[in-house]
Amino acid sequence: MAEALRVGLAGLGTVGGGVMRLLAANGELVARRAGRAITVTAVSARDRHRDRGIDLSGAEWVDDAAALAQREDVDVVVELVGGADGPALVLARATLAAGRHLVTANKAMIAHHGLELARAAEGAKGGVGVALKFEAAVAGGVPVVKGLREGAAANEIVRVAGILNGTCNFILTKMEAEGRDFADVLAEAQRLGFAEADPSFDIDGVDAAHKLAILASLAFGTRPAFDQVAATGIRHVLAADIAEAAALGYRVRLVGIAEAGPPNGGGGLFQRVHPHLVPLTNPLAHVAGPLNAVVVEGNFVGQLLFQGRGAGDGPTASAVVADLIDIARGEFGPPFAMPAESLAEAPAADAGERRGRAYLRFTVADKVGVLAEIAAAMRDAGVSIESLIQRGPSAVPGSDGHVLVAIVTHEGPERCVAAALERLRGSPSLAGQPLWMHLL
Amino acid sequence: MAEALRVGLAGLGTVGGGVMRLLAANGELVARRAGRAITVTAVSARDRHRDRGIDLSGAEWVDDAAALAQREDVDVVVELVGGADGPALVLARATLAAGRHLVTANKAMIAHHGLELARAAEGAKGGVGVALKFEAAVAGGVPVVKGLREGAAANEIVRVAGILNGTCNFILTKMEAEGRDFADVLAEAQRLGFAEADPSFDIDGVDAAHKLAILASLAFGTRPAFDQVAATGIRHVLAADIAEAAALGYRVRLVGIAEAGPPNGGGGLFQRVHPHLVPLTNPLAHVAGPLNAVVVEGNFVGQLLFQGRGAGDGPTASAVVADLIDIARGEFGPPFAMPAESLAEAPAADAGERRGRAYLRFTVADKVGVLAEIAAAMRDAGVSIESLIQRGPSAVPGSDGHVLVAIVTHEGPERCVAAALERLRGSPSLAGQPLWMHLL
């Protein structure tokens, strides 16, 4: 058997601990599959003295994570520090510059700096290149980076759509199952450890947007461009919205979707994270609880579904070590499936030309003329209404006698819906922002 | 860009035509992803003069497929001839012996001769090794070979279970949706081209058993052993069985399952293809029509689901070309995830010690004492009955006044169920063989 692959591990939190536990439990099997042992020779974390319940005796402790990049006994650095910039980025740059492989679970860093890091990896060692791998950055244990980069590589990708944030999916399915409202379920998720104390990265769609930017790059051969992902979260979804959706045969899911923009909108790449109404015929409708799932649609393969646990120490460690096995086998190439230099810059597509059906929900004063006002705004903007329902104050949490009006439109360009909402903006009849969800 | 990867293609049927069409449509994109062009330089098929509607002008015609293995202008042979032995096997052996890479969609050949071919591939070129890849052999376009070999490689696999035959799944879901019986739906499937004129390979579970043997080898690091897969098909499933299952909250699916045998049964590897009652909470219950799906259960990642189209020219070509892209990238290693020499021989597990719940359905004469006879056999064999239902003659197609008795057992060892059925064997009360399905 070849010499061991020597790992320097930065970060000993949930995922780092999981990697240590996985290698302890499955080390022999991993070595058989990888063709060589995978050994952690050095570790770094913030607090040396904290008891993590894992055996670190075989690895040397390094106070400054960035020093891992320079160690002679490290072939590959595993970065589990987190954060788009700061120490994680410093370590990543230093690792690749030193001609060492890099494995990371850091979605924010790859979404923001993926292009720079891919260039550095491909140019390392005088152009020989080193690995930059990030399977764990998207959908946790689900091998969807590999699925796109390799499994579906023969296809022109038509669309990639996924449930990419387990916290949001946990909250939405619990709201659905128990008819409870967002704030209530969020508080419970926080108590159970399914949501962070500061949940905004998750529930406002930022985390899913990081992951979508990575998937879109792999799918479309474009530079990762987080700032072109339009992200909305689930804060404003009411239990009543979920009930209306169910009555129509849909489930509400936070879906990240990327596809080529409509030709009449100038092309470009369309990337969005938004709550959607998902029909029961779509496999994403059946993804419940904290699971993640991604549907990849290719021009020859049709729809592929990848589903599994999107977070947690075990699944994430599984993905990190899968990357290490690929590196040990020598099976790695350009991080984004093709050379970084050939990744196209894709301008954001004009969403206004995108055609689809919309769910619009208004919270309104219960008085004469409000429905007429809404209907007139739709008509004047060219939005065709398929169904409209009004519900009494009980559907609106904390309502001051406000009622709820939910509309589903016929298919049409999104700019018309936007124009209708613009017409209604500032109307004294409306209490709060309308909610606009797309039908998948 | 590096020199083109030169392909010799044997077999121009549905899949071979699909590969040609895919490379024509997506060739430029494939080259960007692969880092080099993939070019078919030579083709071989039975009938040179048949119009296949594909452009073969760039490739040289070779009458004898085996000659592809020796051509100087071929780096990799794609074998799409089919059949476990015969010309396919001759070509595969010759290709590897000549130090050329081999890609195949041939599940029968890999299930029967995978070990020999893997040894030949690893030993080729004086031990440098060549690729032997077979993504298209299992679940068509779904990259589940890669998912096991690489994506889940860090895990000890607890279980792999899948819907591996689209024909059977099409028939079962149609029986379910329309309440029709097997023979009737099979005839329609044949008319629609979803089932072969001789459907026995599909409906008797042989095709699924080939695929399961391959998955089991990848999952458990064992030699592929088709002859140790216990396979039963769906011929004897009645519409009434599907209706009883539905009433209990289950769907009937032909499931291939592999897992470690129970320690008290001497260990070994358990491999079975059998109609199962799948609870609605299991993702396999929601796999409808001709789709394929595989659930991989790892000790760190938990359950992973891979789902998509399991047959057809587009999906299968997608998998074949994905293998070619891996080869063009130089990203390949031992075909069964670890060196062939280290694959363990796994004796078949003693299924009798396996614990589970069973669905048993008897077609019986409608006379006094039959129920007592069945119940006594169960009692005497130590089988505990959870529910029992008797239905009149309308549930039995072509019945001569026979009625149907369906039993669901409590959990217990399978040997007890087998003993109960043995006790009833030859009883004049029974019309035809009882049907035994396992609850997943």
Image: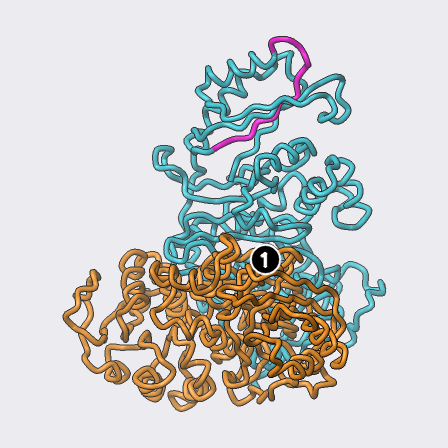
Chain colours: A cyan, B orange
Q: Position of residue B422 (x, y in %)?
A: 65, 83
In the image, the segment drawn in magenta is A357-369
Q: Position of residue A5 (x, y in %)?
A: 60, 76
At a point 75% along the width and 42% down the height, the residue shown is A198
Please state if B376 lies on the left or on the right of B159 as rendered.
right
* Direction left: furthest residue: B49
What amino acid is found at the position of numbered circle 1 in the picture? Ala
**Is residue A309 something one can see in this rendering?**
no
Residue A365 within the magenta-colored segment of the rendering: yes
> Element under label 1?
helix
Quadrant containing the C terminus of chain B is bottom right
Please name whichever residue, A428 or B435, is drawn nearer the observer in this view of the structure: B435
Q: Which residue is mark 1?
A: B243
Q: What type of secondary structure mainly makes up the magenta span?
A: strand
At a point 39% along the width and 71% down the height, the residue shown is B199
Residue A319 within the magenta-colored segment of the rendering: no
Quadrant containing the N terminus of chain B is bottom left
- Would you place residue A364 above or below residue B404 in this image? above
